[in-house]
Structure formats: structure tokens, C-alpha cells
Amino acid sequence: MTTQQPTSAQSERCPWCGAEVAAAQTSCPGCGGTLTFKPRRDDSGWVELPPIKDMARLRVGDSTCQIEGEIVPVADFNLAEGDGVYFAHHTMLWRDTSVTVRTLSMKGALKRMFSGMPLVMTEALGPGHIAFSKDIAGEMIAIPLQRGQAVHVREHVFLAAMRQVAYDWMQSGVYYKTGDARSLDQHYPIGQFLDEFTAADQHGLLLLHAGGNAFVRELQPGEWLLVKPTAFLYKDPSVRMGMCMDNIAGMVGYRSILWLQLVGPGKIGVQSAYPPMEAERRLITYTSGRVCGAWEGQRFASPMAATSGRRDSRARQLLAASAAATIAPTPVRTPPYPRSPTDYRIGLEKLIAESLVDGELPPEAMERLAVVAAEHGLSAYDLRLLINHVKMKISGEGH
Amino acid sequence: MVSDSGWTAAPRIRDLTEIHFGQSICQVEGQIVPVADVTLAGGDSIYFEHHTMLWRDESILVSTLPLTGTIKRVLAGMPFVVTAASGAGHIAFSRDATGELIVLPLHPGMEMDVREHAFLLASRSIQYSFVRIKGLANIFFGGEGMFMDRFVTAGQSGLLILHGYGNVFQRTLKAGESILLEPGGFLYKDASVKMDIEMQKLTTGLLGGAGVALARMTGPGRVGIQSMYHHHKSS
């Protein structure tokens, strides 16, 4: 089954997906994009997806898909006999009684169940009509997959795909942890799993639903970009992913901002309406790491960063933020809460404060502090937290 | 515009379009979350769910619509108070999500069932009641709640305005024709359309799978759906 191609000599190519279209057509039968829409690249390199006109028809083999509506678009498939489409069962809006519905077997169902992914992938077989939509205002993205082409999609973005597109899933490998050593919570800002769709032997149609507007761009080899993790939509398999973290100093402390690092080559897509990440408000103690480190290395160079590896990135970020800030050293303020004079941490805090040079700890001072901390039974992790605490107090951002 | 499968997209109401009913005018403002801004003439009256009122003039008189069976409504989570407003003056309504306003002029002798909490306002010439959805499957798995609003026109025509989440589509079913619908996508239907819930079990071997509830709508009559549906706990 292949995408139907016009045979007229007067044909042109869709500027978006490259499919050959008849000159008289106003919408691409491959991706649904409006042919009168000329894709324009903005100053930063993003290209807005071409709008799919209301009632535009996509054609895959003998079946068609009509996109209806513009606020929360509906994908209305007219399946021919023998054709099929699969979907997460909760996205079905309506269907004819003539359409047969069955479940697709999926590997690793237990892991998916625990990670909150749909346990059931459902397949509908023609003939008849079946329609799908999601529950957020946004855009429909039609990706006509050519033979051998694959795409990685963030979970819960997928709407439906023709059955000639193979489905698989994989660990996203992107996560961070909050809390301290006694109670660590692991979070997956783009989900624990990525959906992988591959058109192995035949062309196929994949439909996604983006919240708000969708934008794509092509990353060159080695080029990388930081995007809000929950805004991420899809990528080519050649694009690698990692995590970076930034901090904003405020009146009462630091606020972490997590970034998804996407490294080319390949195409990436993002959506403009994305859910917040509540866990960002908590103390982030670990991230799964970045792909390449030019950005982070420049901004967060610190003696501790060189020795602690990826772990305790929160501590490194806080150190780096202190190093980057133009803060004049000020005397340590008296803690606002009562403490026992015998508390060894007071002495250690003073020692840390005295050892700071321009807001940073020299390596030799760090070694001396590590020895003192070990004598008091303090772990390296606790010491780093204490150092951060002191630095925040000095910068006036701590409580 | 009619799709290949027979659904008609609700007409997009242009910004600041005016709709006349009785001596009054309803102007639709905005296109993302549209507002129904009603200029009520003296003696004209409308009713609405009190939480949808966006603003009003001081000159508007507000009262409650006398209803029977309100205890059941309270127990079912429906609004206890349906509020009426009388002119002369301005009063405006909107809901809390992106969508479309559906203007349904009801002619004498029509009966229409509407998903609960979906109606924005109706003219007083339309009689208001509610019907209890029968069957435990409908109540617990249908996602509609326990009641549907029923609007009936006796001798006079009237104006009914609904708010649908996302895009709204309408299809007219022939007598005996059926479609299966995600219950959360249901918006309105003619009273002649029969609604039943069907459970479909999707099994995945040892782990059991999921149960999906679908509303079987059987004609004759019109069915309206919204594309941004309220999803219900189907399993």
C-alpha cells in the first residue's frame, strides 16, 4: 500500500513533506498542509507547521483521513476493506458499527502500566469510519513516513497511525531526582518511555496532536538546542537527548529550570502549550546528564564540578551560580533560628565562609573541608549541601 | 461544511455577530472562548446556570427558576439553582474552556437533550426540565452524570445556546441508524435519539486490559458532539 500519487504532468511538490501533488489541489494529500502556505523560517530557525484546512483529506492507499475542525481537530478515517489504524483506546471519539476493534499485543506491558502509559493499543479494521481527537486545544500533525523512515515521539502525543507503520517503545533515558539521600524521587519530564514509529516496508501515515501551535526545525550535526522538556513533541532517531539545569536566584533562594538538550543532526518538533513541571520547585539533586557540555561547562565551571561528575548537579549548579554572580562577599549573617553552641556545623559553616575566595572554594580548601567533615561523620554529599547553604546566606538569597 | 462521514461542522460564528430573539439581541464576542452578550429588552427573560454569568448591568433583575426534584439534582452534583434574568439591560455569559458557541433556535414542538453543564442560556419561552439517565451502566460508565438537561418548546419558539469544548459537529441519524460514541464527546441530541451504553472489553492477556464504555446512539434525530471531550474513567 503506497501513498497515491497524481499522474498528471501538471504536478508540484508539497513544500512541507515533499509529496507530489496535482497543481489543482489546495491541500497536500500526504500531510494535509495547505499548499498555498509558504513555510517561513523565523529569525531563530523555527518553522511553523502549515495549517491543515478544515475538512482537508489525506490519502493513504485506499483509505482517507479527513481533518475536521480547527480548535481541537478531529481525524476522521474512512478505512477501506482490509486497511487498519491503531490508536490509544481513550482517543477514539466515535466509530461506525461496521468497524472492527481489537487489541494489539504489546511487549513490556507491566513496565508501561507502572509508568502510566496506555496499556492497551487498539486497532480498528475497515471498512467504515472511525474518528479520533484529544482533549486539549491544538494542532493536528500529520507525518507521512516514507519507507525506512522512523520517528521518536513523546508519550501521550500520539493520536493514531496506519497499521503499516510499526510501533515500538524505548526508555527515554531522561530523568532527574529530587529530595535528599534518604528520600529520592525520580521524575521523567518527557515520560519514562518514547514511542517509536517506523515505516519499515511501506509508506504510512502517523498522526500526532500538539497542544497549542507546533514548530519544527532541522538541527545540523553537532548543533544543539535547549527546550522546555514538556514542550518536546518528536524527533528524528538521529537526534540525541540529554538534560541540563539552570538556576535563577531570587529573593528567597534558587529556582531550578530544567532543559531538554537536543543534539543534531535531525528534525525536532515542539509545542507551544506545555504542562508545568511542578517538581522543578523542589531540590533537584541529580539529573540523567547532558549529551554535550560546551554550554554547561562554560557556565558552571567550578572545582566541585570537575570531581563530582553528573551526581549532585544541584550542588554544582548552586556553586556555579555563586561563581557567576557578581556578589560582593559579605559577613555571614546570624542564623535566624536558635542553635546549640556546640553544634559542630556552626564551626564548619564559619570555616567554609572563611575559605571562600570570590565566592568560590579553592581546591585545597575543599580538601581541607572534606577532612574536617569526615572527622565529624559528615558525608561528602552533606558537605556540599552545607557549602551551598553558606553560599546562599552570603549572597543574601538564603533564609 | 459536511465531512465524508456525514458530520456537519457547527457554523463558526463571526466575532460580534448579532442573533435576534423576541425583542432582544445576543451578540457573540470572541472566538477562542466566546462570550454571549445579551441585550435584554424590557419584559424579555432568559435563564442560565448561575456560574456561567460573566457580567451584567445593575438594571437586570435576577431570580431563580422554580424547579422540582432539586434534591436529586444536588445529590447528583448538578447545580441547585437555575437562574433567570429579566430585562431591560445587558448580561453576558461564557464558560471556562476553549470552544464554540452553538446557537440552536428551537421551533414549537421540539425536544432536545443536552449534556449536563453544557447549556449556556435559553430564552424563557423554552421549558426546562431534566431527565434522569436510566441504567447503572449509563450513570457510572457513560460519563454523562445522572441527568441530562431537557429543553422543550410548547407553543412558542425560543433560543438555546450551548457551549461545546473544542469543535462541535452534528450528524442526523436515520431511523434505526446507529453510531458508537465516546460518552465524553456527547453534547446534545434530539429526544428521539436513543442512547445506550455498551461496554467493550479490550484484553491484554494476564494483565486483564481495559474496559471501554461507548454510547450507542440510535436514530432518528440529530446528534451533536464536541471534539475536546471530558474523558471518563472507563475501566
Image (cartoon, rainbow, N blue to C red):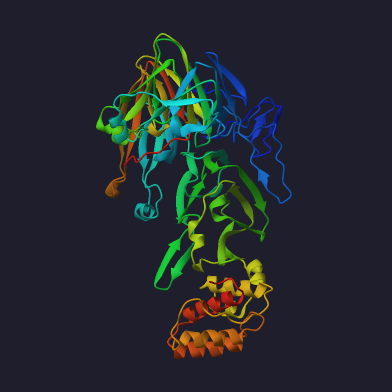
Q: Residue furthest right?
A: A43
Which x, y percent locates residue A82? Answer: 43, 31
Q: Is residue A259 visible?
A: yes
Up/down of A397 relative to A157, above or below? below
Left or right of B196 in this view: B35: right
Residue A181, quarter of the rendered image: bottom left
Q: Residue furthest top?
A: B155
Q: Is residue A291 visible?
A: no
Up/down of B189 relative to B155, above or below? below
Pick whichever, B15 or B67, lies toward us: B67
Q: Quadrant of the N terminus of chain B?
A: top right
- Which residue appears at 63% of the width and 28% of the height? A6
Pick whichever, B104 or B77, lies toward us: B77
Q: Quadrant of the C terminus of chain B?
A: top left
Q: Across the whole image, how many numbered discs are drawn on residues?
A: 0
Which x, y percent locates residue B119? Answer: 44, 27
Which x, y percent locates residue B23? Answer: 55, 14
Up/down of A325 relative to A233, above or below? below
- Which residue appears at 36% of the width and 46% of the height? A105
Pick whichever, A127 or A44, lies toward us: A44
